[in-house]
Image (tube, rainbow, N blue to C red):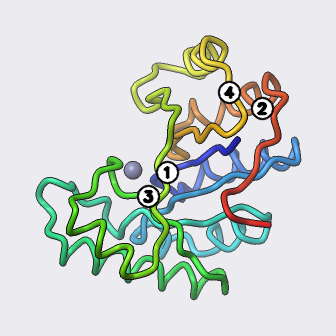
Amino acid sequence: MALTFDDGPHPEWTPRILDALAARGAHATFFVIGERAVRHRALVQRLAAEGHAVGHHSWTHSQPSTTSARVLLEETRRTRLLLEEITGRPAPLFRPPHGTLSAAKLLGVWWQQNTVVLWNKDPRDFRLPDADALVGWMKAHPLESGDIMLLHDVHQHTADALKRILAVTKLRCNAIGVQ
Ligand SMILES: [Zn+2]
């Protein structure tokens, strides 16, 4: 199964999440926002250095409904290039903001040779009040092999819950597409 963390990197909570993953020998996939990555380059380097997959999630987290295909494709191009420059590795994984793409945008991101990664488990962690609520959701919806879970590394409660989430799953937690 794969844990994915969107919307970072965050200077406080991303390092806490990395520490929790390292303590369990677990790897994850981070879909970072370009304008945050450019401010926290060392964190992006740390993601790659510790064996996590680093994907892109647009430059500004632009709203799909008000963003043209041309603007989105410029954001994906710019963010992917930045990540490749920082990590020295190809960064083809792309998660669209809010998981939505029009047909024109989908064609464009394929044309740019990106791989679109969505998810099948979503606790909506950003709406939960605290770590207990997130751990409770995980217990009610146990992870299964092949699951791709959506989380966000920009919330303290997600960072707080991660150690406990990793403690209750017996599955291996792998980075997407990283050998
Ligand atoms: Zn997002």
Of pointers 4 and 2, the one earlier in the residue sequence? 4
Amino acid identity at mark 4: Leu
Determine the residue positioned at 61% across, 15% down: 132
Amino acid identity at mark 3: Arg
Compared with 80, 143 (above or below) is above
Compared with 170, 39 (above or below) is below
Image disc number at residue 143: 4
Amino acid identity at mark 2: Leu
Of pointers 2 and 3, the one earlier in the residue sequence? 3
- x and y, in percent, of residue 115 in the image: 49, 67
Name the residue that disc number 2 marks: 166
Name the residue that disc number 3 marks: 95
Of pointers 3 and 1, the one earlier in the residue sequence? 1
The reply to whether callout 4 and callout 3 are in contact (CB within 8 Å) is no
How crowded pointer 4 is (Cα within 10 Å; few <14, some 14-19, many 20+) is rated as many
Determine the residue positioned at 57% across, 16% down: 137
The reply to whether callout 1 and callout 2 are in contact (CB within 8 Å) is no
Of pointers 4 and 3, the one earlier in the residue sequence? 3
Name the residue that disc number 1 marks: 6
Q: Is mark 1 within 8 Å of ligand 1?
A: yes
Which element carries disc 4, helix, strand or loop? loop
Q: Label 4 to label 3, Cα distance in Å?
A: 21 Å
Foreground label between 2 and 3:
3
- x and y, in percent, of residue 16 in the image: 70, 46
Residue 136 image-quadrant placement: top right
Q: Nearer the viewer, residue 139 or 130?
A: 139
Q: Label 3 to label 1, Cα distance in Å?
A: 8 Å
How crowded pointer 3 is (Cα within 10 Å; few <14, some 14-19, many 20+) is rated as many
Q: Is mark 3 within 8 Å of ligand 1?
A: yes
Determine the residue positioned at 77% across, 32% down: 166
Which element carries disc 1, helix, strand or loop? strand
Which element carries disc 3, helix, strand or loop? loop
